[in-house]
Image: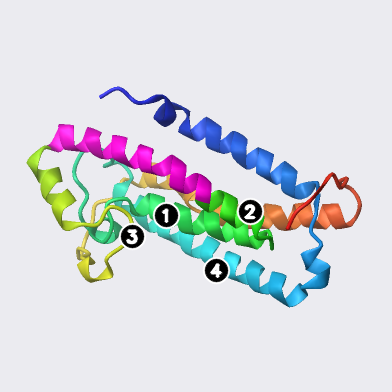
Amino acid sequence: MKKSVIQRLRVPLTNIFAVLLFVYFATSNRPWEVTYPLFTSIFFFTGLVLAAIGSFGRLWCSLYIAGWKTKVVITEGPYSISRNPLYFFSFIGATGVGLATETIFMPLLLIILFAFYYPHIIRKEEEKLLARHGQSFQNYLDSVPKFFPRLSNLTEPQEYTVNPIIFRTHIFSALWFIWMVGILEILEELHDLGMIPTLFTLY
């Protein structure tokens, strides 16, 4: 099945959007840091926790799917509680990064964009898997929720075959949300030192 335009452009568009957000954040003044320091601290630490959950959740997913994506129907581990756990944990991680900016605008923007963008990606990928795997994937569709996990479904094997080479290549991207929070802190420090100009106000 031919990939849609959105599927083909997903990675480059995501990268471009991430760079633009970082530039916007780096050149913005955030007055709530001064007027509501407790509020912004709660936002940051909540964001840090969510970014960590998102990163380690993606790492958990990569352990199961590395080398097996589209080849077989993965139904164990994170894929036993959600059909799209990689995207679920990406959503958690992205929300965490948004909150780590200590603003309202950033997390709301990321949540809205995710809600508009990823349902199409999920639908196209599931159509492809259904066409390839037939009834076995249909049974999976019928028993596992599409996005939000059902923890009571969790099943994990005693042993699992992992492709170490492919898994190793997934580690960096799996932990990307933690790196992003670190980059935000560096940009914030450079901005506070006056090394990056202020062009916007961000709430």
> Which residue type does callout 4 highlight?
Val
Which range of residues does the magenta coloring cover?
112-133
Looking at the rendered structure, the kind of residue marked 3 is Phe
Residue 35 placement, left or right of 89: right
Crowd band around label 3 with a 10 angstrom C-alpha radius: few (<14), some (14–19), many (20+): some
- For mark 2, give the secondary structure: helix
Residue ID for mark 3: 148
Q: CA distance from mark 3 to mark 2?
A: 22 Å
Asked if residue 92 is among those painted magenta in the image, a careful observer would answer: no
Q: Earlier in the sequence, mark 2 or mark 1?
A: 1
Label 3 or label 4, whichever lies nearer to me, is: 3
**Pointer 4: what residue?**
49
Which residue is identified by label 1?
Answer: 58
Mark positioned earlier in the residue sequence (2 or 4): 4
Q: Which residue is mark 2?
A: 106
Asked if the residue at tag 1 contacts the one at tag 4, i.e. Cβ–Cβ closer than 8 Å, the answer is no
Alpha carbons under labels 3 and 1: distance apart: 14 Å
Neighbour class for label 1 at 10 Å: few (<14), some, many (≥20)? many
For marks 3 and 1, the one nearer the N-term is 1
Q: CA distance from mark 2 to mark 4?
A: 17 Å
Q: Amino acid at mark 1?
A: Arg
Crowding at mark 2 (Cα within 10 Å: few <14, some 14-19, many 20+): many
User: What label sits on residue 155 in the rendered view?
Assistant: none
The answer to whether marks 3 and 2 mark residues whose Cβ atoms lie closer than 8 Å is no
